[in-house]
Image (cartoon, grey):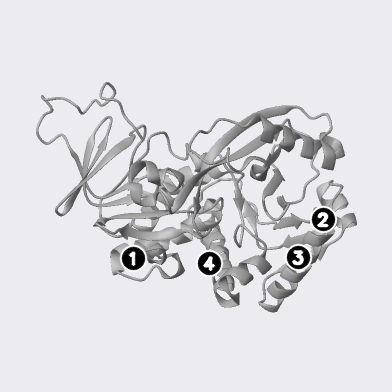
Amino acid sequence: MSISVWLDETHTAHKPAGADVEVDVLIIGAGISGTSLAWWLKDSGLSIAIVDKGDIAAGASGRNAGFITCGSVEHYTRQVGRLGEDLAHTLWQHSQENLAMIRDYIVADGGVDCDFRQQGTYSLAGSEHEMRELEESAEMMQQRGIAVSLVDQAHIADKLGARGFFGGALFHDDGECHPVKLVRGIAQLSGASVYSHHEVHRLEPTGDVVRVHTQRAVFRASFVVMATNGLSAQLHPWFADKIYPTRGQILVTEPVAPMMAAPCYCNHVLDYFRQLPDGRVLIGGFRQLAKEAEVGVADTPNPEIHAALEAFLRRHFASLEKARVDYRWAGIMGFSADGQPMVGSLPQHPQVYFMGGFTGHGIGQAFRVAKVLADVMLHGESAGPYSARRFI
């Protein structure tokens, strides 16, 4: 989030009066969270604009695996141990509602074609220890009425074409999609004005108005929303110890014959893979191999991690032993300090709102979390477990 004086087209002593773009709400970030907020605000009567340094979904929202999963970044037993059973279950329910809202409001009623499917996801155990943890998680979840069932090695071989796992669990309600088609569809349905290739480099709150400077325009808004997730600290220092930019790695093979019935996680939800509608197989993860190197905003693929991703496919899938790799990329996620999304406004500037810290599960959480922020902005409601006050 830096613009040189040479690239700042607004930096001129002869800028005509009235050249500012004026809106009621300016959303910074055209990813899943920013476009979702615009959708929830569409009937408010407010004028809404979205700005982004690239195109719609050009950041993490267009660089993820397209999972719309329920839950969080860890097995249910660990979530319960860290948050308590009631809050862990509440957050799981919220993620279920997120998926249902996308399905019902965007895919069904909105008519957005984003390759949406709801055939569940698997969590596969790479060790006997993890299998025991999955068994404990499944038992706790079933007691809460969550649709989950355990599967054995024969099931995994038959439904996923995979080998080398100790069993797993099938979460029946999870889904998947083409994330760019989803986000672009939400943006279109929102009716918001979208200003692509406008990199914000300065916020200037003055009285009741916030001036937002990009390299191509100056926006004046009554309210500004930072939907910048992993890049938030680049725009405001308050986020430096609250949302950490973390790089994720993905590769995609050439098309192969259908073999995988649903997307999968493994290795304690750190690694993930799925077969796309055209037969290509996508795999991401292995950040644990180079945790320190994967912190930061550079979206360059890491050769060490990509070698591990490729080796994993060759080891666990006979049909992929000789498959060509067609795509390799990286993307910047926003990990919050406690693993949960955060919603609020800047302490010194209450007209500047934010949401972020989705910790690798933006597609699985952001649509509903955006509704929480919309209710905060429009009705003064509490952000509940997502309130950023927990960090103050």
47 with respect to 382 (left or right)? left
Identify which residue, 175 or 185, lies in the foreground: 175
Q: Visible in this render: residue 197? A: yes
* First reached walking from the N terminus: tag 2 or tag 3: 2
Which one is in front in this view, the residue at disc 1 or the one at disc 2? 2
Where residue 71 appears, as percent x and y from the top left, is 61, 62
Give the residue at the far top of this rendering.
6
Q: SS of the residue at dot 4?
A: helix
Image vertical order of residue 185 relative to residue 314, above or below: below
385 with respect to 204 (left or right)? right
Crowdedness of circle 3 by 10 Å Cα count: few (<14), some, many (20+)? some
Crowdedness of circle 1 by 10 Å Cα count: few (<14), some, many (20+)? some
Crowdedness of circle 2 by 10 Å Cα count: few (<14), some, many (20+)? some
* First reached walking from the N terminus: tag 4 or tag 2: 4
In this figure, which residue is indicated by the disc labeled 4? 94
* First reached walking from the N terminus: tag 4 or tag 3: 4
**Badges 4 and 3: C-beta atoms under 8 Å apart?**
no
For the point 83% across and 52% down, the residue is 159
* First reached walking from the N terminus: tag 1 or tag 2: 2
Give me the C-alpha separation between circle 4 and circle 2. 30 Å
For the point 52% across and 46% down, the residue is 182
Give me the C-alpha separation between circle 4 and circle 1. 17 Å
* First reached walking from the N terminus: tag 1 or tag 3: 3
In this figure, which residue is indicated by the disc labeled 1? 376
262 with respect to 103 (left or right)? right
Image vertical order of residue 204 relative to residue 341, above or below: above
Report the amino acid beneath label 2: Ser
Where residue 370 appears, as percent x and y from the top left, is 42, 58
**Badges 1 and 3: C-beta atoms under 8 Å apart?**
no
In this figure, which residue is indicated by the disc labeled 2? 127
In this figure, which residue is indicated by the disc labeled 3? 133
